[in-house]
Image: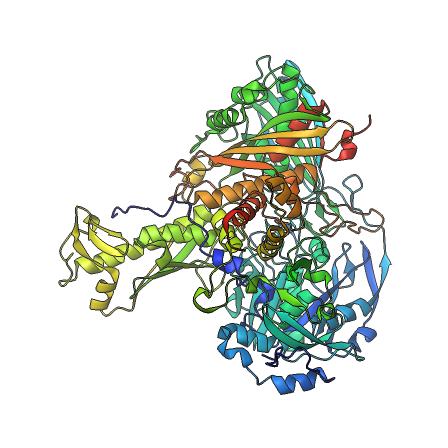
Amino acid sequence: MSAEISNDDPDVEVPEVSRRGFLSTTAAGGVAAGVLPSSLAAGRADASAGRAAPSGGQSSALSVTVNGRRHQVTVDNRTSLLDLLRERLALTGTKKGCDQGACGACTVLVDDRRVNACLTLAVRCEGAEVTTIEGLAAQDGERDGELHALQRAFIEQDAFQCGYCTPGQIMSGVACIREGHTGSREEIREWMSGNICRCGCYVKIVNAVEQAARGGRD
Amino acid sequence: MTRQTRPAAGTPLSRVDGRLKVTGQAAYAAEHDAHGAVRGVAHGVIVTSTVGRGRITGIDTRAAAGQRGVLKVISHVNAPELPYRPWRGVPDPARGERLRVFQDDRVRFFGQPVAVVVAETLEIAWHAASLVRVSYDAGRPATDLASPAGEPNESENYTRGNVDQALRQAHVRLDRTYRLQREHHNPMETHATIARWDGDRLTVWDKTQIVLNTRAGLAADFGIPEASVRVISPFVGGAFGSALRCWPHVTIAALAAREVRRPVKVALTRKQMYTGTGFRPVTEYKITLGADQRGRLTATVHDIRAETSTYEDYREGLGDVGRMTHATPNVRLTYRTVPLDINTPTWMRGPGPATAAYAIESAMDELAYELGMDPIELRMRNEPDRDPSTGVPFSTRRLRECFRVGSRTVGWDRRNPRPRTNRDGNWLIGTGVAVATYHTARAAAQALARLHADGTATVQCGTSDMGPGTYTSMTQVAADAIGLQVPRVRFQLGDSSMPPSPPHGGSMTMASVGSAVQDTCDKLRRQAIALAVQDPRSPLHGTTPDDVTVANGRLHLRDNPARGETYQQLLARNNRTYLEARGGYTPGDEVERFSTHAYGAVFAQVAVDEHLGLVRVRQVHGVYDAGRIINPKLADSQAIGGMVGGIGMALLEHTITDPRDGRIVNANMADYLVPTNADIPNVSAIYLGGDDRTADPIGVKGLGEVVIVGVAPAIANAVFHATGRRVRDLPITIESLLGG
């Protein structure tokens, strides 16, 4: 669990540490062992193992909340939010489809707004609250694991095939519903057009967004 | 055989892997490190050529190698000679040789891998890759069919009857040329491979539609036994053919991992996908139709030219449609490929028929206008009773019914056939139709099934699920054959250690793997029944196996359901932790004795802005005869998806090459246009259903390909109906509808 520490104080100062130093102090942590499935925890520990510091002081300390968990990490300044999620935090639900902001597969919510994580530098997310597909299902008590209404609708409407654009579609759809852009099928189509689905599931994506907008919990 | 009710197949079950996909937990190729399967992964970034033809005269890697965190820069200068044992994979072209990575200084196309930078992090690898300086002795590449890089390859020829005589006597003769531009699959997941060596054993996590092909390819490249390679690919984020072959980057990942003695992940960028995998080739299709007064085709001539690379002769089923779709006594067909300085084209959804049907079904529409005949009626007058190319009977062919059902649904009878007669403000409205056909391919497959003591079952086959729902449909077939409810059956795929499967492509998975799964699970059920009837302590002791059926995990006499026991009881009493069966499917001579195809009637309605030339699809409706439908919900998605792909083919998709250096100028998802949600209003499909047991033991005819075939010509024909303008080049763009 090298990419995460348990200090939740947003004002905590992160001293300038080298990546190697940072790793050596946290590699044995295993903070998440009791929280995450062991395979994920192992993956996270692994995701940063053996990393080298970028050359020439090109790293920054970053404090960002992802799916309600605070992460304090030192990132290479070149790191996109997408690569931070996928390569550092082992949150691979957010997908890399084009890495150029053209396909929407990497859509996440940053402070409740949908953004392309591939076009967002991680360091810009200082203090931000990021919600990814992994944080959408209920994570509390008796409803733990209960899917978001739009996730359920995607399954019921069969709004995906290969599943690769799906997390981005769902995050976009959640925002689309919150934004109130679901007045008609045409409006949904328009406001969901930043997310490409190459399997061609658009008709059913609209069905799913419509279903969730109509009845589901947000 | 014991009779068995099969309640799961045919029901619109939601995807069994749906939860994994909507929660982001499904592990795609580049994600297996994050999922904990492989540790200590380094990142490889490929450097590609910036000339389209020539030789590398120098590679300066000093700046790149000097970056902190860079492990190695590998190019032909320092790469080891790889064995590249002679090998031709099932999806490989019949002639030519795969591109060998870093084995010489030749550049065969723009975007060819020339080096790989391996570093601790992706950011470092990226930056270092940008610092690699490659110099070339470059020539101008040939990238256009009109000016090839060499002599055309040997043509494929087919003739029946006397074409010239028939054309001389034809009442109507039509000569046309249609062109299709290059198209890229652009699956949403970019191709990626993680490779790890353990001594001389290699494990790769790869995006592939056929794990066995990647295994065989890597074994050949590195000169090691296939048994030393394991390929794992549980989820494929779309492919449509792009993940059939063992591409250069797969070998690069394995080579890099061996060189740096660490697992290495190589993920292609979207841009690299355009030259690192394949594409649907540029094709020019000249067609001549001869018909009598009543609209019966008397002769057709098909002269086809398509692009290929200089190092491989890629061919697809471009001649299939011309040989067999419409009854024609006299046919001549020539199919040539032209070598260009490009990477090799490959299978893309509906390979061959999707392109050929555009030409043939457009020409049929033109012929209908020449004859003053309804385009559906013209096709009905040319419906064959037997396969015109072989003379053998069809297993099933219900194209007439497809048109009947579709005509009724879209109200075809109300159509005024005259072009430019229907408008909605500035929008000219038109409708068009086309025939879709695709050969039902079948190939040998095997499966393994285990019934566990807790009454659940696991079934395996090393096939793939790039989106159609293999996990789900196989679970349904297995559940029915074993006699369990769906939630108690787990189907596993995507691992080369599982029983072998043919490629997950060509619409053959359900027929081949589905039949293998059914055979295997039937064997497993019969094994359990045999155990029960021979067991003195079983309530079924001494009964006839054929009288026993299994439902909901309970074996019982069909005529006396009260007499029986559960799988759990049977296994527990016999101290068995599991029962296991292996089975399979091998196509028989029915493949030769019958002509087996999936069919479809495709209807399109478009609106064309009279002044701006904008084309908007208003409706696409397909009616398909694809045999038995195992899961109507998933089949519906697949059909709609195929039609959406067809809309892209008709109106948007076009890979553009700069002829000066061979660079693809729109190698990204902003400039290579694919349909977005706003482009897709009303797309729907109907399956006639049915059950073609002549085709294969489970009665299916394949879905994935036929649903893209025919869409582009239906739209092109609708554009003509709307505007009176015939566009014979795909995609149909604004420019092609303006001016002149």
Residue B448 x/y as whole percent: 38, 59
Residue B655 x/y as whole percent: 73, 46
Q: Is residue B567 above or below residue B13?
A: below
Q: How is the image coloured?
A: rainbow
Q: Is residue B631 above or below residue B490?
A: above
User: Relative to the observer, which residue lies in front, B106 or B578?
Assistant: B578
Residue B319 placement, left or right of B569: right
Residue B233 x/y as whole percent: 53, 61
Give the quadrant of the C terminus of chain B.
Answer: top right
Residue B134 placement, left or right of A98: right
Residue B734 x/y as whole percent: 76, 34
Q: Please tell me how many numbered marks the rendered image carries.
A: 0
Residue B565 placement, left or right of A34: left
In the rendered image, which quarter is residue B33 located in?
bottom right
x 58%, y 75%: residue: A44
Q: Is residue B650 visible?
A: yes
In the rendered image, which quarter is residue B378 located in?
top right
Q: Is residue B103 visible?
A: no
x 70%, y 31%: residue: B178
Q: Is residue B388 above or below residue A53?
A: above
User: Relative to the observer, which residue lies in front, B213 or B33?
Assistant: B33
Q: Is residue B40 above or below residue B299?
A: below
User: Relative to the observer, which residue lies in front, B357 or A70?
Assistant: A70
